[in-house]
Image (tube, helix red, strand yellow):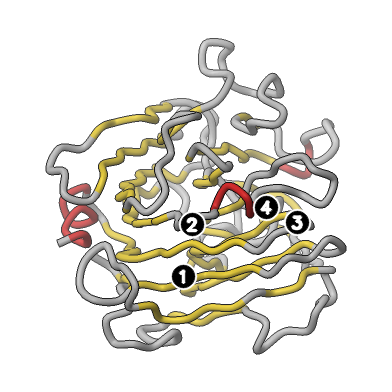
């Protein structure tokens, strides 16, 4: 394991982790986001006695977020494995109702983020499912409006698919619609082979419920790039020649559009590793 976060030390910022919440940002900040709260909870944990509780208040005018980050760098053509456990408390579904009465998704797990065009291949949730969204390639040359030239996996626009074979287009669920349980810990293993090569990318996800021993492979995509190039939000530009060593962050988070009800999740046992077994050991 390279590094992890299991909250057992009772601290929000420790082991290289730092955060963005309402106690250290404005509301809204310069990006129009109002940040929620983060605390160490003893109500439930995937293992041990503590977990991280991420909460967003009702706000019908601004996007809301909480972000917990660990600094890292980008490397082209590199295998990486991640572990993350999440539990959705009672009332989660209500919290996914927007100000206009529709429902939304929220980001949960955004590894290797470096501000070109949103998250790379990442884990999100709706009110009743967990899924992987894909967003990669030379985003300065997409020619398709927002998003990158390799994109798929949004439950609200499931027919939008760019760059991938038609047989892969559509949703890639870790927990399919209608199956998501409240007050159950979901343990997720996430594997990405990070590459700019349009034919060599790998994205895989396994899941099990706390207490189960067997892993179930739910997402298995061997196609497309898994890194982004293009202009960043800070006026710099990531290219194939400078991407190695580019500053990046691994993120666990909640992020959603303006919504009429508060929402909260528990997250635990996050880690970044170099093998499947090392990542799986984070749940012990």
Contact flag, marks 3 and 2 (Cβ < 8 Å): no
Of residues 276 and 27, which is closer to you in this image? 27
Calculate the distance from the C-alpha at mark 3 to the C-alpha at mark 2: 25 Å
Q: Earlier in the sequence, mark 1 or mark 4?
A: 1
Mark 4: which secondary structure? Answer: loop
**Closer to viewer: mark 2 or mark 1:** 2
- Against 77, is 165 above or below? above
- CA neighbours of label 3 inside 10 A, class few (<14), some (14 to 19), many (20+): many
Q: Quadrant of residue 37?
A: bottom right
Nearer the observer: mark 1 or 3; the answer is: 3
Q: Position of residue 203 (x, y in %)?
A: 42, 36
Which numbered disc covers residue 72? 1
Q: Which residue is mark 4?
A: 118
Q: Secondary structure at mark 2?
A: strand
Q: Which residue is mark 2?
A: 111
Of the pair 166 and 25, the residue shown nearer to us = 25
| Relative image position of residue 283 (x, y in whole percent) | 21, 59
Task: Tell us which disc is closer to us: 1 or 4.
Answer: 4
Q: Secondary structure at mark 3?
A: loop
Q: CA distance from mark 2 to mark 1?
A: 10 Å
Residue 216 screen position, x and y as percent: 25, 32
Residue that extends furthest to the top in the rendered view of this protein:
167
Position of residue 36 measured from the top left corner of the image (x, y, whole percent): 65, 74
Characterize the local packing of mark 1: few (<14), some (14-19) or many (20 or more) Cα atoms within 10 angstroms: some
Q: Dots 2 and 4: beta carbons under 8 Å? A: no
Residue at the location (48% across, 66% down)? Answer: 73
Residue with the mark numbered 3? 259
| Side of 50 relative to 147 (left or right) | left
| Quadrant where the image shows the C terminus | bottom left
Q: CA distance from mark 3 to mark 4?
A: 20 Å
């Amino acid at each position: 394991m390279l590094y992890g976060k299991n909250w057992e030390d009772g601290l929000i910022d420790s082991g290289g982790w730092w955060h963005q919440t309402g106690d250290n940002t404005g509301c809204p900040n310069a990006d129009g986001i109002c940040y929620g709260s983060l605390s160490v909870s003893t109500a439930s944990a995937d293992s041990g006695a503590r977990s991280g509780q991420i909460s967003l208040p009702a706000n019908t005018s601004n996007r809301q977020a909480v972000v917990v980050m660990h600094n890292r760098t980008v490397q082209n053509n590199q295998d990486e494995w991640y572990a993350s456990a999440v539990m959705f408390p009672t009332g989660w579904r209500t919290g996914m109702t927007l100000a206009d009465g529709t429902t939304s998704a929220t980001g949960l797990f955004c590894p290797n983020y470096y501000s070109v065009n949103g998250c790379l291949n990442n884990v999100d949730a709706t009110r009743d499912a967990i899924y992987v969204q894909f967003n990669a390639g030379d985003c300065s040359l997409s020619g398709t409006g927002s998003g990158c030239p390799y994109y798929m996996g949004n439950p609200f626009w499931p027919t939008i698919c760019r760059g991938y074979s038609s047989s892969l287009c559509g949703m890639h669920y870790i927990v399919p619609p209608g199956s998501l349980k409240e007050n159950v810990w979901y343990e997720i293993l996430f594997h990405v082979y990070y590459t700019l090569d349009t034919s060599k990318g790998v994205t895989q996800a396994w899941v099990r419920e706390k207490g189960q021993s067997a892993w179930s492979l739910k997402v298995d995509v061997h196609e497309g790039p898994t890194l982004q190039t293009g202009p960043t939000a800070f006026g710099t530009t990531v290219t194939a020649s400078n991407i190695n060593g580019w500053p990046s962050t691994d993120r666990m988070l909640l992020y959603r559009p303006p919504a009429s009800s508060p929402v909260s999740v528990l997250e635990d046992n996050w880690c970044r590793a170099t093998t499947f077994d090392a990542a799986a050991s984070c749940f012990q």
